[in-house]
Image (cartoon, rainbow, N blue to C red):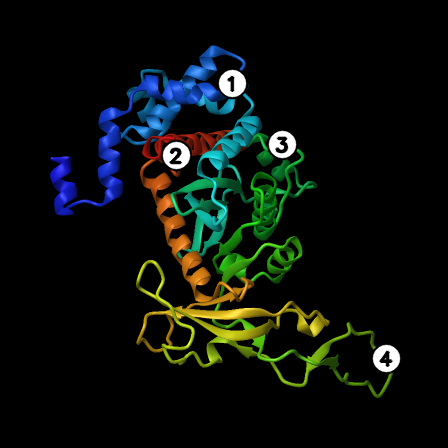
């Protein structure tokens, strides 16, 4: 039946692969896979619970909440909860071992680091770091936990590299008694504090520099692409990037000549002290105002997906913070869109620091990597139950995410045996 569905194309490859694994995955296979991590557990009971948890994530036919997995794996719900919150095991050491193992098996010198947001919807206010936050994917405010994730995309496969929970500012008010109580209930370590989302993503990029022998290209959506500090940090560390920016982002078509703006002087009283403001002889313009009607024979290329054309619109200087006298490194403005379509609301713009030698081929490859990363994330969400954990405590959230990573690594190891 499954082979007939593959031949007739009635189901996607991901769904069919899930059905095949459901028929073949056993607890002994999971235990054999998890044996490489047994040194991070102090007791055999914890090792067995972790193996059963991963087995419950991999197997189909039930929800991936702790209660449903307990019924499927033959242990009590309390035991699985203890695994996530009370049992002692080296979560950080296991994560480093996972990353090193995946990098050795599925590393790629042409790999791409895809940074993104993962929204964990939450109704109540008791889960760790929950707040009303803006989701780039949903395009609206939603009560949720927000995580910054990074997917490594190679030519062979894609796999989750890192994921960190974003802490809103009101979860880090040290002088607020209610905040301290809230952090204590959520078991947040005292050395964990609020950090901007781009800072979390940059930490992941720096970690990748330690794992992989050479810097990889980085790509991200508008939530990071519009942050000049993130792009400047990538320039300093030597990472090439292709990041999406909003259509109202201002840029200079030519290198701006900045000079101090004239101030209005008061006729009476002591002169006011103003912050030095700069102005440019030629004002910046929105990227949406730049003409994208370039002939198809000038620097265009269809990507691997076959559904977009890539155009490099030339060198621009980002205008963010230019009033403060800050001049950013020149980058390439890129506009991919459907061939033959006019510029409209669906038009997307990117800033690229990729070497010009690669041209549109590199840009098209990275745009395809973004789609592959989204497929990998959706597989973790719908196939492995990434969002189905309650996530009440800091340690429980991180342990659940790590076990989902291990489940993903198991599936990739079976799909690409060495």
State which mark lies toward you, 4 or 1. Answer: 1
Q: Residues within 10 Å of mark 3 (few under 14, many from 20)?
A: few
**Whole-percent x, y for residue 312 in the image:** 47, 72
Q: Name the residue under label 4.
A: 271
Q: Mark 2 points at which residue?
A: 408
- Distance, label 3 to label 4, CA atoms, is 49 Å
> Of the residues under marks 4 and 1, which one precedes in the sequence?
1
Query: The C terminus is located in which quarter?
Result: top left
Circle 2 — which element? Answer: helix
Q: Name the residue under label 1.
A: 87
Q: Do the residues labelled 1 and 2 touch (CB within 8 Å)?
A: no
Circle 3 — which element? Answer: loop
Q: Are marks 3 and 1 in contact (CB under 8 Å)?
A: no
Q: Please give left or right for residue 214 compared with residue 38 in the image.
A: right
Circle 4 — which element? Answer: loop
> Of the residues under marks 4 and 2, which one precedes in the sequence?
4
Q: Are marks 3 and 2 in contact (CB under 8 Å)?
A: no
In the image, residue 210 above or below residue 224 = above
Q: Which residue is painted at 65% across and 78% down in the image? A: 255
Q: Do the residues labelled 4 and 2 touch (CB within 8 Å)?
A: no
- Distance, label 3 to label 2, CA atoms, is 28 Å
**Whole-percent x, y for residue 354 in the image:** 54, 62
- Distance, label 3 to label 1, CA atoms, is 17 Å
Q: Residues within 10 Å of mark 4 (few under 14, many from 20)?
A: few
Q: Which residue is painted at 60% across and 49% down in the image? A: 202
Give the number of the disc on residue 189. Answer: 3
């Amino acid at each position: 039946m499954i082979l007939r569905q593959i031949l007739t194309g009635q189901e996607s490859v991901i769904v069919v692969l899930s059905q095949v694994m459901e028929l073949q995955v056993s607890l002994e296979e999971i235990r054999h896979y998890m044996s490489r991590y047994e040194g991070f557990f102090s007791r055999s009971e914890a090792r067995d619970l972790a193996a059963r948890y991963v087995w419950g994530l991999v197997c189909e036919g039930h929800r991936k909440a702790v209660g449903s997995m307990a019924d499927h794996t033959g242990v009590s719900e309390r035991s699985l909860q203890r695994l996530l919150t009370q049992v002692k095991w080296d979560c950080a050491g296991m994560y480093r071992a996972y990353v090193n193992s995946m990098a050795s098996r599925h590393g790629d010198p042409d790999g791409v680091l895809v940074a993104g947001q993962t929204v964990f919807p939450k109704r109540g206010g008791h889960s760790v770091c929950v707040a009303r936050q803006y989701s780039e994917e949903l395009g609206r405010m939603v009560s949720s936990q927000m995580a910054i994730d990074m997917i490594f995309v190679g030519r062979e496969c894609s796999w989750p590299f890192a994921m960190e929970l974003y802490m809103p500012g009101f979860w880090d008010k040290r002088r607020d008694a209610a905040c301290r109580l809230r952090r204590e209930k959520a078991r947040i370590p005292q050395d964990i504090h609020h950090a901007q989302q781009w800072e979390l993503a940059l930490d992941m990029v720096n970690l990748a520099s330690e794992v992989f022998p050479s810097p990889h290209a980085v790509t991200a959506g508008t939530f990071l692409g519009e942050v000049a500090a993130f792009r400047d940090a990538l320039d300093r560390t030597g990472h090439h990037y292709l990041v999406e920016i909003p259509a109202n982002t201002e840029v200079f078509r030519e290198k701006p000549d900045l000079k101090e703006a004239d101030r209005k002087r008061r006729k009476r009283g002591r002169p006011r002290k103003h912050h030095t403001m700069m102005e440019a002889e030629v004002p910046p313009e929105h990227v949406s105002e730049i003409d994208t009607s370039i002939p198809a024979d000038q620097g265009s290329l269809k990507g691997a997906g076959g559904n977009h054309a890539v155009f490099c619109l030339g060198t621009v200087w980002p205008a963010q913070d230019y009033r403060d006298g800050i001049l950013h490194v020149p980058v390439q403005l890129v506009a991919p869109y459907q061939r033959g379509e006019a510029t409209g609301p669906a038009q997307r713009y990117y800033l690229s620091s990729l070497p010009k030698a690669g041209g549109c081929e590199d840009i098209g490859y990275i745009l395809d990597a973004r789609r592959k990363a989204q497929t990998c994330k959706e597989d973790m969400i719908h196939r492995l139950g990434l969002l189905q954990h309650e996530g009440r405590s800091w340690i429980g959230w991180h342990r659940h995410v790590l076990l989902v990573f291990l489940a993903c690594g198991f599936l990739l190891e079976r799909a690409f045996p060495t």
